[in-house]
Image (cartoon, rainbow, N blue to C red):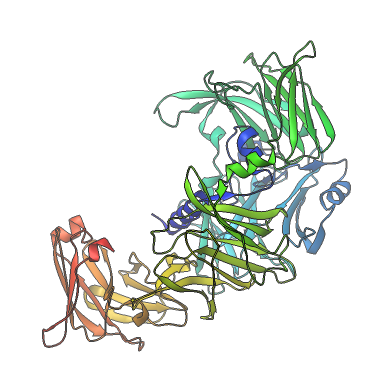
Amino acid sequence: MTPLEERLKAALDARAQTYEAGQNAWLSVRARTPLPPRRGRWLLAAIPVAVIALFVPVLLNGGLGRNSAADPGTLQRQLMAGLTPVGEPVELGGLKLWFARGKLGNPQFCALSGSGREPVGSCGAVHAMGAGTYEGSASGKDAATVLDYGLAQPESAGVRAVTGDGRQIAGTVHRVPGAPMAIWSVSFAAAEQVTKVEFLDAAQRVLGEMPRSMLAGRSRKAKPAGLPYAMAGGLSLRPYQVPNDTQPGATDLEVIWTRAGKEVGAIPLKNAYLWKGGGADRPWPVRLQAEDGVVFGAARPDVARIVWTREGRELTLTPRPDPWGLNLGLFALTADARDEDRGHTVVAYDARGEEIWRNDPPPEKEEAGFFGERISDKIVVPDTEDFSFGPVELWFSKNTEGTMLCASGGVRPDGGKSGGCSTTQLDRHFSSRATLGTYLPEPGAELAYGVLSPATEAVTAVTVDGTRIPAQILKAKGGPAAVWAVRYPANVKIAAFSHREKGRELDRVDVWDHGCSQTPAREGTGQALPGGVSAHLQAPMCLHFWKDGKMLPGSFERLPGTNLRAIVGREQPVQWGQHKDTWYGFALPGTARVEGVSKSGKVAAETVPDPWGHGVAMFAAPVPDGVARKGLHWPDLSFTGYDAAGKVLWRWDRAGLS
C-alpha cells in the first residue's frame, strides 16, 4: 500500500466509525435521494477535459455554478453574501480564485469563471487534509492546454505535475495573506498524460502527492447510451452503460447528471431499485437532490407536479418526459437551496392534482433515536465556553451498533453546528478519537476527545515541536468509561497522542502526523550497517532505513522531544522491519546480538551503537531464503537479545501477536 493509500485508508476508517450529527442528519438518512455519496476533497469527481467549456472550471466540492448571473461582478457579489473576503483574489486567465470567511470565522474557498456563455462560480468550505487538495481543472482558450488547481498546506513551497514517463512540469504556489492554505496551479498541454501532482517543501522534497487518476468518474468508465440533455442550472443528463461493480463484463444502465463536467448524481435504472429507496413497503416515486443552487431529480411517469417546501417557502417542480424513452420524468429548477437544508417537505401530485406521496421531516424524538438512547449524563467540557455553539458537551448513547460516545458543540467548516457520535470499543488499548473545533476567537481552537481505556492513567497531546498538553479526565454519571479531552490552538500541529497505562514502561502512542510515511531524501551519511543498509534520523520524529538508494518499508516513529530509546522497552525490546532479503531495526541498549525465529525460519544480526546518542543498538543483516520468500512476521515469532558475553539479556515471546 502506498503512503497516500495508507493515509486515505486511515481517513476512511476514522470516518466510517463516526456518525456526523449534522442538523439534518436523520432527515438525510431517511429522505435523502439515494444518489452516489458526495466525495471529500481528496476523493475527486470526474474531470472529462474534452467536454469542459473554455476556461469553465470543474469545481470538485460545493458544486460548480452554485449561482449564475449576467455578469461576473454580480455573481461575485451573490457568492459573497454573508461572507468576508480574505486577502486578494488570484486571477488565472478567466478564472478567479479567492478565500473568504463565514460569520463564524469558517474559511471558504471560492472560484469564479467569467468566460463562456454565462459566468459560473461557487464558494465551499475549506477542508485541510493531507499535503493539499485538488479543487478543479479548466481548459485553456484554445482547448489545447489544461489548468489544474487546488489548495496546499502553508508549508508547501512548490508544486509540480508528473507525467506517466516521469517528466515534471513546474507549477506555482500562490500565497494569500491571512488565508489558511495556499492556492496552487499547474498548466500543461492537454495531450500530456499527467498522472499526479506533487507538493514540495523548500528543499524540493516531496511532502505529499495527489494522483490525477482520482479524477476519473463513472462516466469515464462507461459507454454513452444516448445524447446529452440540457436542463436548468447548467445541468446535463446522459444515459450510460456503466460497468457492473460485482459482475465482470456486465453493465447497468444509469442516467448520470453533470454540471459543466462534474458528476453530481446518478440514477440506476434497475427496476428492482429505481423507486424503492424508501423500502419495499414505502417506495419513493420521487428522487430529489439539491446541489448548491439547483433542485433536480427524477420521478415516476405518474408524477405530474412536485412541491418542495422549506422554511415556509414553496418550490414547484414540473417533471418532463425524458428524451430517451426511459419512462422517467425529469425536473430541474434553480433555487437558493442545498442538500444539507433540513426541515423540508416533499409532496408529489398526479395529473388530477391528487397527492400520491409525501415525505415530511421526522419528529425530534425520531432524530434522537437515530443516535440511540442516551445512557449517561452529559458532561460539559471545561474551557470550551468560547466555542461557537459551545460549550462542548459529551455523553454516551447506545443503539443497535453498540455503545457510542457523542459530542455537541463547535462549528463545522461549512458553518453548521458540529457534533456526532462515534462507536466505541471499550476493550481496546485506546478507542477512536474525534475532534471538534471553533474558528473564533482567532486563531481558533481544536478539542480532541475519546474514551479512556480501563488501564489508561493519562493522555497527553504532543505537538510537532515536542510540547506536551495534558488531557482532562472527565466522568459522566451512568457512562461505561471515563472520557479524555484536550484543547489546543488551531494553529498548533499535533504529532501524536500518548496514552500512559498502569504497569507499562512504554506509553501507547497514537500517531496523528503520518509525515514519516512520505519518502524523504536521505539526510547526511547516516549510520552504515551491514549489507549496504544505512539508517537515517529525520527530525522531528522519524527513523528510516535505506538500501540501494531506496527507503526500506517501515518508518519508526517516536514522540517529538524524545529519543529512540523511548519506543523500546520491557514490553517491546526491539523495533524491526523486513524487506525481501534484509531485516533491520534497533534494540535495547546493551544488546550485542538479536535473534528471531518463526515458522518461516531463523534470523540473526550483530548490533552497533547508534551515532545520535539515543541509547539503542542498531542492526541490519540478510535473511535466509525461506524467510525472504515467506516473511518473518508469523504468530509464533519470538525474539531474543544477547549481551556481548552471549548471555540472554531479554526475550520477547509474543512478538508475532504485537
| Position of 384 relative to 397 (above/below) | below
Where residue 104 sits in the image (x, y, percent)?
A: 77, 61
In terms of depth relative to the viewer, which is nearer, 158 or 620?
620
In terms of image quadrants, where is residue 143? top right
Left or right, 543 with reference to 351? left
Left or right, 222 with reference to 591? right
The answer to whether residue 72 is visible is yes
In terms of depth relative to the viewer, which is nearer, 632 or 528?
632
The answer to whether residue 519 is visible is no
| Position of 107 relative to 570 (above/below) | above
Instruction: Say how many tags the image has.
Output: 0
**Outermost residue to the front:** 478
Where residue 294 sits in the image (x, y, percent)?
A: 76, 35
| Position of 44 relative to 506 (above/below) | above
| Position of 407 relative to 329 (above/below) | below
Where residue 169 sits in the image (x, y, percent)?
A: 56, 58
In terms of depth relative to the viewer, which is nearer, 515 or 572?
572
Residue at 19%, 68% in the rendered image: 653
User: Looking at the rendering, in which quadrant would you find the C terminus?
Assistant: bottom left
Where residue 98 sits in the image (x, y, percent)?
A: 76, 58
In terms of image quadrants, where is residue 578? bottom left
Left or right, 355 with reference to 27? right
**Outermost residue to the left:** 646
**Outermost residue to the top:** 352
In terms of image quadrants, where is residue 391? bottom right
User: Looking at the rendering, in which quadrant would you find the N terminus?
Assistant: bottom left
In terms of depth relative to the viewer, which is nearer, 68 or 644?
644
